[in-house]
Image (cartoon, rainbow, N blue to C red):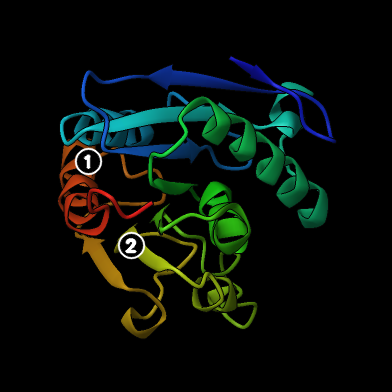
Amino acid sequence: MEIATPHGPAVAEIDEVADPRFLLVLTHGSAGGVDAVDLLAVRDAAAGIGGVVARVLQPFRMRGARAPGSAVKQDEAWTALVAGLRARYPGLPLAQGGRSNGARVACRTALQVGAEAVVALAFPLHPPGKPERSRAGELRAAGVDVLVVNGDRDPFGVPEPADTTRLVVLPGEGHDLKKDPARVGEVVAEWLGATMRPGSA
């Protein structure tokens, strides 16, 4: 599904379920795509609890860029594409998230798009080797429940539990969360199952 935004088209790969309980919109990191193993594992696990899952390739990646550039423009595009997806699934409660940079845009826009929850996979707390440049404020400012799933070997750091609703740190995992992606999916599905209550839209 192609979705127009003020900054170029986005493409959503949508997996529907027979009896949907909620809509989960997921996206990639700066240089990645929607077929990252952790995103696929979350898709599969969320579908098992009634989630319609849209994995979105953002406009900057459609243009071939490996970095999102302006956060303002990225957030404007994200807000528009989520509105397009919500129009297709009216009445479903919304959760959104992504991995790395995708987790950041999900936190920054959660209130604006009306999300009830954010799933932040491999949240990049700071650039590698630069802990003084913390992005914890984006987690704290999300304004909704935020689940963070990070590996304990992530060079981008691990957020503090106080800055999240729930923090799960997976031993032996790096930034790519590819050692045991099924475990990532299980953690997310367990949390969403409790958070995305029927009739909460």
Q: Nearer the viewer, residue 68 or 117?
A: 117
How many other residues sit within 10 Å of disc 2, few (<14), some (14-19) or many (≥20)?
Answer: many
Q: Is residue 158 left or right of residue 114?
A: left
Question: Looking at the figure, which quarter contains the N terminus?
Answer: top right
Instruction: Give coordinates of residue 58: x percent, y percent.
Output: 66, 32
Residue type at the position of mark 2 = Leu
Tag 1 residue = 185
Mark with earlier residue (1, 2): 2
Residue type at the position of mark 1 = Gly
Q: Nearer the viewer, residue 64 or 130?
A: 64
Instruction: Give coordinates of residue 42: x percent, y percent.
Output: 29, 37
Q: Nearer the viewer, residue 174 or 191?
A: 191
Image quadrant of residue 45? top left
SS of the residue at dot 1? Answer: helix
Disc ID at residue 147: 2
Residue contact between numbered discs 1 and 2, judged by CB atoms under 8 Å: no
Up/down of 9 relative to 121, above or below: above
- At horizontal 25% and vertical 58% (from top left) the residue drawn is 195
